[in-house]
Amino acid sequence: MTTRRRHQALYSLFGGALLALALACGGSGDDDDTTSASSGESAPASVLSRVEALAPATDSASFEVYERQLQSNELVQLSRAAGQPVPSYLREYPLPPTLTDVLMHDFRLTASVDLSMGTIDRPVTAEQMTRIIAFYVETPDSRIRGLRPVAHKRFITGLTDAERAQLATEAAAHVNANGFFGPTP
């Protein structure tokens, strides 16, 4: 019987250690959640920065213009690096450096072609950006031009009215600082 009691004591001790470990891990997770929630409340997150997290389509049949051209540019660069001639059906075109700049490029295209705002010179106002954003909300994605029209339409329609107003302000500030095609090197 003493061996049986020893085993029970070891199992109890081992079970208690596992329980303590589980509680310690669970407790630290709760602290991290409250810290990130409180830090999120103190500083409002940039709506425009969320554009960088927009995932591209994973199925090549669903690629938008941006993803197809990015893939084409990569194939051209691989051909050159391998010392091979670039296939005649591939063309390399410069793309905006970030996904935020892709959105600004598409905004500029929408403003000049669809909204007949002409060439928008800096300084760009939040009112101009609000008009462009309203176009994205009101227009079906099949009628929106640009490099990533579907992704941008989904992004903008997923925002609240307050977030859209914040996006207009942030987009105007971004264009005024970097231009529609991103910072020039």
Image: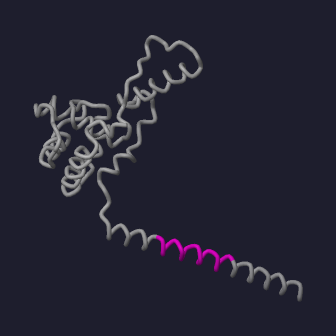
Point 39% across, 30% down: residue: 62
Count of numbered circles on the image: 0
Q: Position of residue 115 (x, y in %)?
A: 12, 34
Point 27% across, 49% down: residue: 158
Q: Position of residue 3 (x, y in %)?
A: 89, 84
Indicate the colouring scheme. one colour
Residues 94 and 88: in front is: 94
Q: Position of residue 173 (x, y in %)?
A: 23, 50
> Position of 5 compared to 173: left or right?
right
**Looking at the picture, does residue 46 appear above or below residue 92?**
below
Point 34% across, 51% down: residue: 49
**Residue 117 in magenta?**
no
Magenta stretch secondary structure, dominant: helix
Q: Position of residue 146 (x, y in %)?
A: 27, 31
Residues 19 and 68: in front is: 68
> Position of 50 compared to 27: left or right?
left
**Looking at the picture, does residue 62 appear above or below residue 154?**
above
Question: Which part of the image, by quadrant, shows the C terminus?
Answer: top left
Determine which quarter of the picture holds residue 143: top left
> Position of 115 compared to 91: left or right?
left
Q: Which residues are magenta?
A: 18-32
Determine which quarter of the picture holds residue 6: bottom right
Point 26% across, 35% down: residue: 106
